[in-house]
Structure formats: structure tokens, C-alpha cells
């Protein structure tokens, strides 16, 4: 017994691409599976324990030791994997494979692994003589290698294929390489069945653990942006399917028991049609509606590739007798996807991190709740729950439902009863409005809110409630548990509906004076025809303060449930659209829990950012040009002023010089010019040889004596 346990402790299993969809699950379950445990009978408790154990990632000492390769070389090593093999040439991988007891190749998810799997089994087969112990090769292939197989009984086309029919299988044209690889692996396994047994597991279409092939349907239903899920082709074709964890259990059984049958079908018992699968997804995750789309229209869609359509178009009925008769499988979804849709949806949401976010934002009137919530809903892709819209939409739905009484349907009796209930509800609402001056009692509003919060969109993505509930009593009634069977004694006050209870409660706080100033500073067009008129605002503010005293407030209700409200003072927020408050709430709520932006949204966002940047550049350029033009005008103006002042200075200088020259001119005219004139006249008469000398002598002789 000790020797047997020692052998178990050293079982090494190689799994290719441990970071891929199916092999990630297979390797993780192998790392948690005790070697040889699947050969023993397990009771129901053991089944539950093994399922629960899938949550952890740390392998146990007596489990399989998993090694493998990565599809993404940059990805980190998974916690449950002991070693990652890195290589440049596949020949470098052979010595590593020879150190393993079981070699598993999945050729479904990555066609590029077909050549490597064929090479690996051939290379290992050539090294059989060097084996120190028996080694097992397992190839996980696809049921698509059966896609063109003729019926076992032409008179009974619904008779399923079994493992015994594998020699008759005919593959889909796009899966001929898979079929060749299967044949090679089975052939080489016959060389030495004791030392190197080989197995081919032909798996049905995989689902579960976040989804792969069916992800398109799950995502479309979860997003809720289309009215009906599309069924490609006729939808009446039977799809062979299996939950990915059930496939992993089959692999564990093969590793432990090494069955004599070398070709194994891995399918569940569902034999569901494509329409059955899509309808169950739509009913439990979306609107419940489906529509049939032809092949040509299907292939026109971007997200529909040819291989995707080929797999969804296969029509195969399969029955795995070996699994039922010889294997100890802890089934996760033995009866197929539609019967286990609740579990699969839970795995889908958890695996993809698509958990709904639920929040409630309250505060006094004019505190900016709607402004803040609108931005938060855009950021987190949540539904904005406003009381008026909830009431109006609920009444429209009731009226529409009551009107269906006259429309013939397949479920006429049920629709008639529903229409009658809707009509009675509308009568009660009308009576209530008549008695309360057009207002509804809390019982109607709370019922409308419950229906809205429990609707599929709110349960999928989440919601933010805008200012409701307003009182403790409204909160208790709104979040009360309808089914009281699970209530515990002494804890009735702590019971609430967890599906609609907010995770985050935010209270916007402010003084009354600040709120009044906000209202006064609002544009007239935003105030008219709203509750934010002076009289309307004052009335609402008084009502809010009256129902939110220190001892009685809806926040106390949440606080008692240990959903502690966060208080944010909006008086410190001076940013446009209250962006500072929005950022504070985002820090409280954390990262989004959704798919994030779609490629179209990314393109739109990039385009908007580009347009915003270009607009900013144009605005900056315009401002620069405007500033330069203004500077040029100012410079020209100053230059003109300088020139004007310069001319004025010159004029004043001339005037000053002119004024200063008057006495001298008068002196010259009186004392100099007469003598000079006479001298010139004499010079003309005499005509001397040197007129200048003559004139100088004349002025010297006739110079008048002047007393100055």
C-alpha cells in the first residue's frame, strides 16, 4: 500500500496550453484530484466536496502533478501548475515529455496544436524502448470529426452514435486534419498497448466556466441590447454537448483507470437542439425571445465566423456508453445545458466577472443626485432608476398587458387571467390617484420598484436608485423578503432581499442655504416646468428635512443592516457637472463589473477624444491668432499714438524755436539789414574784384553803434 501511494505521489501530467479555455479547467481539476480516487466508489457527500474543492487553486500532495505549456508566453504560471515548459523548437520539448507519466493534448481550441500533438505522439512512440515506466497519451478532439457520418440506421435517424461506431465516422471538411490526427494517435497506441496506451476523447461542444463557443449568446442575452437572441440556421439540429468540468472528470478517469476502449465519446445526455439551448439562455438571462436567422444572414455578421457557424450547424445524436458503464463521473450537468442553465449562468457571471453593481444615492432636493447618477451609470453601464420613470413605465406595461385580452394566443387562458389582473390593478391605481390628488400610495410604488429591480436588465448589469427609498418604512417594505421560509428566529429585522439590496449607499449632504443658492443660480430654462421653482423647492426641502431627522432616516435602516452609508459634502465641489463628487463615488464603488467598452464604443470614444483634441487645438489656435491680432492692433495703436505725440513734440519744438527767433529777427531787421542792404547796393555799383571783402569792409566802416 505504501508503494502504491508513493507511485501516486509522483504521477506527472503534461497538459498543453494550461491557460486556454478547456485545458485550464482540465489542468486545474487534475491538480486537485487525488491519484486513483476515480477508481473508487464515491458517495453523494464526496461529490459535493469535490465540486466545492474546485474553488481553490492550491494542489494537494497526493494529487496529480501538472506541468505544461502556455498559449501566451507572457502569461504568468498558474498556481496549480508546477512547471511551465518553454521551448523554441519542438524537438526541445521531447525530453520534458519523457519525464511525464501522462501527456494530454487538446487539439480543439487551437488548430495549431494539431501538428505538435501528432509530432509528440510519434516522437514518444519512437522512444518506447527507453521508457522506464508506462506512459499514457490522451488527445482531446472534437465531435466535429463525426459531422458527416451517415446514420447507423437509415430507417431510424434518431438512433445515437456510440464508441463502437468510431470507425465509420466522417469528419466535417474543416476538421479533416483533426480526423487524421485521431487516426494516427489510435494507430500508434497499438504498437505497445502496455507501455504506451493512447486515447482519443471526442468531446461535444463545450459549455460552462465562463463560456467559449456559446459565449456570443450569453453575452448578447446579458447585455440586453437586442430584443431576441438569434438562432442560426433552422435551429432544429441536435448539438452534442458537455460541460467542460465533466470533460475534465472524464480525463481524470482515463488517467486513473486506463480503459480498454481507446476511443471515447464525451457527451452529456441532453441531445438538445440549438433552438433549445438558445431559448433557455434567452429565457433565463435575456428577454426570453428568440428569432431564426438564415445561414447567409448569419455569416454577414462580424461576430459569426465560418468555424463558429459550422459547429453550431452540426446535427449529431451521440451516446457515450463507456462513460455511463465504466467511469465514476461526478457529473456537473449530466442532463445538459438547458436543464442546468441556472448553474451555467452563475458560472458565466462569476467566470467573466459580470456581477451586478447595486447602489442607492439619496440627498436633499437640488443636491445634484440625478446629475451624478447619470455620469455613474455611463461609467459603470448601469440602469438609472428614477421614480417617475418607474411609475410611468409600469402603468404603460399594465395597459399593454390589459389590452392583450382581445388578442388570440396559444396560452389564451393564462393571458386572459394576466390581462384581468392588469385591468384590476389599473382600476385600483385610478381610484388611488383620484383620492390622493394624482399621487400613488406607497404600496403601488414599492411593487413597481420591486418588479423593476428584479427585472433581467437590473439583475444582469445592476442599477443606481435615484433618491428612493425616502423613509425607513419604504426601505423595509421595498427590500423585504417575499419568501419568509428562510427567516431565522430572532433575526427577522435583518432579513432582506439580497438580489435587490444596494451594496453602496451614498448620501449627498449640504446646507439649506447652499441649496437655495444653487436653485437661484440655475438657468431659467432648467427651472421652468420642474419641481425646482421657488415654491416647489421650498416645499420639497421642508418635506425632506421633516422625514430625515437625526433619529429617523432611511440611512439608519441601511446602517442597521451593516450597509454603512457614505456621506459626501457637495458644498466643496466646484467642478462642472459635479465631477469631483462623481470621482469620489467611483473610488468608493471600485472597478466596473462588466465587459467594458465594446470595439464600437472604443472607436466612438477614440473618435470623440480625437475630435475633442482637434477642437481644443482649433480653439487654442484661434485664441493664439486672436491674441496675436489683438497684440498687433494694440501695437499699431501705440505706434500711431507715438507718431502723433512725436509730431506734436516737433510742432511744439518748432513753435518754441519760432518764438525764440522773434527778438533776433527784430534785431536783425532794425540794426543789421539796413546797413547790409546799403552795402549790397554799393557793391553792385562798384563791382569790386572781391565782393565779399568789399562787403566786409563796408559793414566794418558803417557799423552802427548800438547800446544793448
Image (tube, rainbow, N blue to C red):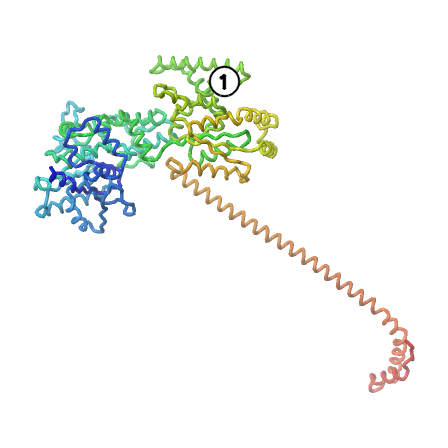
Which quarter of the figure is the C terminus placed in? Answer: bottom right
In front: 645, or 266?
266
Position of 55 relative to 413 (above/below) = below
Position of 390 relative to 675 (above/below) = above
Q: Residue at x 57, y 33 (%)?
A: 511
Q: Decide if residue 381 is in sight here.
A: yes
Q: Residue at x 16, y 48 (%)?
A: 94
Residue 372 at x, y percent in the picture: 49, 34
Q: Specify few, some or many for label 1: CA neighbours under 10 Å numbering under 14, 14-19, or 20 or more.
A: few
Residue extending furthest bottom? Answer: 689
Residue 51 at x, y percent in the picture: 24, 31
The count of marks equals 1
Lateral position of residue 289 relative to residue 257, left or right: right
SS of the residue at dot 1? loop
Lateral position of residue 622 relative to residue 90, left or right: right
Residue 556 at x, y percent in the picture: 47, 27
Residue 115 at x, y percent in the picture: 19, 44
Residue extending furthest front? Answer: 490
User: Which residue does the numbered mark 1 point to in the structure image?
Assistant: 441
Position of 674 relative to 21 (above/below) = below
Q: Residue at x 18, y 30 (%)?
A: 329
Which quarter of the figure is the N terminus placed in? Answer: top left
Lateral position of residue 363 relative to residue 317, left or right: right
Amino acid at each position: 500500500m505504501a508503494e502504491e501511494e508513493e507511485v501516486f505521489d509522483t504521477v506527472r501530467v503534461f497538459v498543453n496550453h494550461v491557460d486556454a479555455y478547456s485545458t485550464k479547467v482540465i489542468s486545474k481539476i487534475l491538480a486537485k484530484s487525488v491519484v486513483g480516487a476515480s477508481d473508487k466508489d464515491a458517495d453523494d457527500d464526496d461529490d459535493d466536496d469535490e465540486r466545492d474543492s474546485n474553488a481553490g487553486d492550491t494542489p494537494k500532495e497526493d494529487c496529480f502533478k501538472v506541468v505544461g505549456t502556455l498559449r501566451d508566453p507572457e502569461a504568468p504560471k498558474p498556481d496549480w501548475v508546477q512547471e511551465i515548459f518553454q521551448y523554441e523548437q519542438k524537438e526541445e520539448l521531447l525530453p520534458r515529455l519523457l519525464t511525464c507519466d501522462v501527456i494530454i493534448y487538446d487539439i480543439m481550441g487551437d488548430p495549431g496544436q494539431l501538428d505538435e500533438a501528432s509530432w509528440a505522439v510519434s516522437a514518444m512512440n519512437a522512444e518506447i524502448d527507453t521508457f522506464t515506466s508506462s506512459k499514457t497519451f490522451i488527445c482531446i478532439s472534437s465531435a466535429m470529426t463525426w459531422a458527416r457520418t451517415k446514420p447507423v440506421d437509415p430507417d431510424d435517424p434518431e438512433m445515437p452514435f456510440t464508441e463502437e461506431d468510431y470507425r465509420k465516422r466522417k469528419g466535417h471538411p474543416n476538421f479533416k486534419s483533426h480526423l487524421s490526427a485521431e487516426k494516427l494517435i489510435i494507430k500508434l497506441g497499438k504498437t505497445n498497448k502496455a507501455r504506451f496506451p493512447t486515447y482519443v476523447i471526442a468531446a461535444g461542444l463545450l459549455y460552462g466556466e465562463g463560456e467559449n463557443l456559446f459565449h456570443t449568446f450569453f453575452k448578447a442575452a446579458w447585455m440586453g441590447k437586442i430584443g431576441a437572441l438569434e438562432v442560426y440556421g433552422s435551429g432544429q439540429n441536435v448539438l452534442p454537448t458537455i460541460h467542460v468540468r465533466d470533460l475534465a472528470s472524464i480525463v481524470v478517469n482515463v488517467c486513473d483507470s486506463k480503459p480498454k476502449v481507446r476511443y471515447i465519446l464525451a457527451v452529456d445526455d441532453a441531445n438538445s437542439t440549438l433552438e433549445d439551448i438558445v431559448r433557455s439562455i434567452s429565457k433565463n438571462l435575456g428577454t426570453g425571445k428568440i428569432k431564426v436567422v438564415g445561414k447567409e444572414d448569419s455569416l454577414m455578421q462580424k461576430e459569426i465566423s465560418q468555424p463558429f457557424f459550422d459547429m453550431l450547424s452540426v446535427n449529431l445524436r451521440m451516446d457515450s456508453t463507456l462513460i455511463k458503464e465504466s467511469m465514476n463521473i461526478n457529473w456537473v450537468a449530466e442532463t445538459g445545458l438547458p436543464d442546468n442553465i441556472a448553474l451555467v449562468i452563475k458560472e458565466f457571471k462569476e467566470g467573466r466577472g459580470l456581477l451586478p453593481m447595486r447602489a442607492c444615492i439619496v440627498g436633499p432636493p437640488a443636491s445634484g443626485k440625478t446629475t451624478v447618477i447619470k455620469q455613474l451609470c455611463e461609467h459603470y453601464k448601469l440602469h438609472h432608476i428614477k421614480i417617475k420613470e418607474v411609475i410611468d413605465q409600469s402603468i404603460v406595461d399594465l395597459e399593454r398587458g390589459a389590452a392583450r385580452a382581445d388578442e388570440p394566443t396559444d396560452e389564451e387562458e393564462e393571458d386572459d387571467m394576466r390581462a384581468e389582473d392588469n385591468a384590476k390593478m389599473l382600476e385600483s391605481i385610478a381610484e388611488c390617484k383620484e383620492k390622493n390628488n394624482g399621487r400613488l400610495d406607497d404600496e403601488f410604488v414599492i411593487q413597481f420598484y420591486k418588479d423593476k429591480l428584479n427585472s433581467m436588465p437590473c439583475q444582469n448589469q445592476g442599477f443606481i436608485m435615484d433618491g428612493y427609498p425616502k423613509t425607513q418604512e419604504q426601505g423595509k417594505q421595498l427590500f423585504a423578503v417575499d419568501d419568509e421560509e428562510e427567516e431565522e428566529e430572532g433575526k427577522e429585522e435583518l432579513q432582506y432581499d439580497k438580489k435587490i439590496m444596494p451594496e453602496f449607499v451614498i448620501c449627498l449632504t449640504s446646507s439649506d442655504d447652499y441649496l437655495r443658492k444653487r436653485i437661484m443660480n440655475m438657468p431659467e430654462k432648467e427651472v421652468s416646468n420642474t419641481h425646482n421653482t421657488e415654491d416647489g423647492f421650498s416645499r420639497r426641502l421642508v418635506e425632506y428635512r421633516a422625514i430625515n431627522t437625526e433619529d429617523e432616516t432611511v440611512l439608519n435602516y441601511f446602517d442597521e443592516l451593516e450597509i454603512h452609508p457614505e456621506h459626501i459634502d457637495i458644498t466643496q465641489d466646484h467642478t462642472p457637472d459635479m465631477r469631483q463628487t462623481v470621482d469620489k463615488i467611483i473610488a468608493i464603488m471600485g472597478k466596473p463589473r462588466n465587459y467594458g467598452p465594446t470595439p464600437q464604443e472604443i472607436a466612438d470614444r477614440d473618435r470623440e477624444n480625437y475630435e475633442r483634441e482637434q477642437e481644443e487645438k482649433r480653439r487654442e489656435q484661434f485664441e493664439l491668432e486672436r491674441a496675436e491680432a489683438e497684440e498687433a492692433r494694440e501695437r499699431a495703436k501705440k505706434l500711431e499714438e507715438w507718431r502723433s505725440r512725436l509730431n506734436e513734440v516737433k510742432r511744439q519744438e518748432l513753435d518754441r524755436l519760432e518764438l525764440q527767433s522773434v527778438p533776433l529777427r527784430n534785431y536783425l531787421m532794425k540794426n543789421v539789414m539796413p546797413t547790409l542792404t546799403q552795402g549790397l547796393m554799393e557793391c553792385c555799383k562798384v563791382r569790386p574784384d572781391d565782393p565779399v571783402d568789399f562787403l566786409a569792409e563796408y559793414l566794418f566802416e558803417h557799423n552802427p553803434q548800438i547800446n544793448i
